């Protein structure tokens, strides 16, 4: 059974009480540092969890990119926040977009298996197959002699569908 997330209870004032928001750099700067970390006063958040900047407010962990989105848009993102340039610590609002999980996964350079998204080896292991999910349907792009050709075909099809 999937664990339920705790509801988001903080408001803009809760964030701005503890941090100053630097729009130019997309950073949050401590106005009130964590206990025993007085040296962080007037310094940006640098705590990293899985490559993303993170802080705690009222006992709950928050990714900085989600807080920046909330501060800029006056609402929490509906889906996931994608870092357009792929740099997980670049939280300038122009580098952030609210996307579905599928859109965010397609933005990856490689998947967990170390291969580019949208491609896999065929069953006999001699060729590469490329497919894409667009408009709710899986579309077979083709079978290719090597990984590079399959990946290029996938990227081209993503552009064609505006993905």
Image (spheres, rainbow, N blue to C red):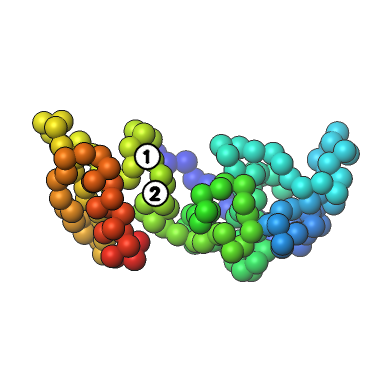
Which quadrant holds the N terminus?
top left
Q: In the visual, does 126 lie left or right of 68? A: left
Q: In the visual, does 43 lie left or right of 145? A: right
Q: Residue at x 36, y 34 (%)?
A: 114
Q: Is residue 87 above or below residue 161?
A: above
Quarter-of-image position of residue 39: top right
Q: Residue at x 64, y 59 (%)?
A: 92
Residue 134 versus residue 61: which sits nearer the camera? 134
Pointer 2 residue? 105
Pointer 1 residue? 111
User: Could you classify mark 2 by the number of other residues whose Cα lies within 10 Å: few (under 14), some (14-19), or many (20 or more)?
Assistant: some
Element class at badge 2: helix
Q: Residue at x 71, y 41 (%)?
A: 46
Q: Residue at x 28, y 47 (%)?
A: 151
Element class at badge 1: loop
Q: Are marks 1 and 2 in contact (CB under 8 Å)?
A: yes
Q: Seen from this angle, which residue lies furthest bottom?
A: 74
Q: In the visual, does 62 lie left or right of 162? A: right
Residue 140 versus residue 85: which sits nearer the camera? 85
């Amino acid at each position: 059974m999937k664990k339920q997330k705790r509801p988001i209870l903080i408001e803009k004032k809760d964030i701005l009480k503890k941090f100053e928001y630097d729009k130019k750099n997309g950073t949050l700067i401590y106005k009130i540092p964590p206990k025993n970390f007085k040296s962080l006063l007037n310094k940006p958040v640098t705590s990293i969890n899985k490559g993303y900047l993170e802080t705690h407010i009222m006992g709950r962990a928050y990714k900085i990119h989600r807080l920046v989105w909330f501060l800029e848009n006056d609402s929490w993102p509906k889906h996931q926040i994608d870092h357009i340039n792929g740099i997980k610590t670049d939280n300038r609002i122009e580098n952030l977009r609210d996307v579905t999980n599928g859109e965010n996964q397609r933005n990856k350079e490689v998947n967990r298996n170390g291969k580019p998204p949208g491609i896999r080896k065929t069953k006999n292991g001699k060729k590469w197959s490329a497919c894409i999910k667009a408009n709710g349907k899986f579309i077979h792009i083709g079978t290719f002699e090597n990984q590079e050709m399959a990946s290029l075909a996938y990227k081209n099809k993503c552009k064609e569908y505006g993905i």
